[in-house]
Image: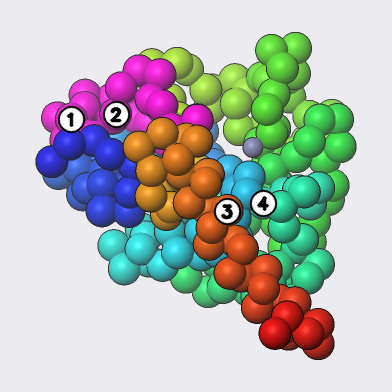
Amino acid sequence: MSCGFDLEHYRELLAAAEVGGYRFAHFADAPTEGTVILRHDVDISLDAAVRMAELEHEAGVSSTYFLMTESVFYNLDSREGAAAMERLPALGHRLALHAVYPNAALVPDFDPLVSWHNPDPEFLQAPLADGRLNVMQGLWFDSATYRSDSNQRWRFGCPRDDLRAGAFPWLQLLTHPEIWVYPGKTMGQTMRAMLEAEKARRLQQLADDRIDVS
Ligand SMILES: [Zn+2]
């Protein structure tokens, strides 16, 4: 199977990790040999996050969802936000903060972890003053044990084959749910597909808000 960005291939990545003998871990402890830490930065879509979380749950896998309190695309204080914050842990996953520098809100029930949204090199790996873990700091980040799907491009290639071969000592795997849930061969196509789905959702929200959209 080719290395696309869809849920079927994401499931393949999880299966490859199992074949490679990896265990799935979280950020609480320093990374150890033979583990894969699944990280999701939720930049755009809570819907996509929940769909990915359901797939992981079916695969018996637990990951950490980094949610934004300052997103222009979703609102954790809305009913939809509250539902996602209930659903993700119910599926066995952890929640943490995806923050816009320099703000890093303290959110009850989130793990004491921060991932920065679009980080600049100056603070990318800097420890936080309040003791929460920057997931890119120190032992948690090494380019040899890190893969990210940013902008629907693997900078060092899709990790499937190396996972299957057990070639990583351990791996922090960052994926953005909306890239995998919405179809498209490029980030531009995928975002346009996301916007189409969003339009239908927005119309429903308007109707729910007693706006006459007939
Ligand atoms: Zn982000």
| Amino acid at pointer 2 | Cys
Q: Which one is in front in this view, the residue at disc 4 or the one at disc 3?
A: 3
- The residue singled out by tag 1 in the image is 161
Secondary structure under tag 3 reads helix
Determine the image quadrant of residue 108. Answer: bottom right
Mark 1 touches mark 2? (CB < 8 Å): yes
The numbered mark, 1 or 4, whose residue comes first in the sequence reads 4
Say if 197 sits above or below 169 in the image: below
The numbered mark, 4 or 2, whose residue comes first in the sequence reads 4
Give whichever of 152, 200 is nearer the camera.
200
- The residue singled out by tag 2 in the image is 158
**Marks 2 and 3, how far apart at CA:** 26 Å
What segment carries the magenta color?
151-173
Secondary structure under tag 2 reads loop
> Residue visible at 35% across and 18% down?
156
Q: Which one is in front in this view, the residue at disc 2 or the one at disc 3?
A: 3
Residue 9: x and y, percent?
Answer: 26, 47
- The residue singled out by tag 3 in the image is 195
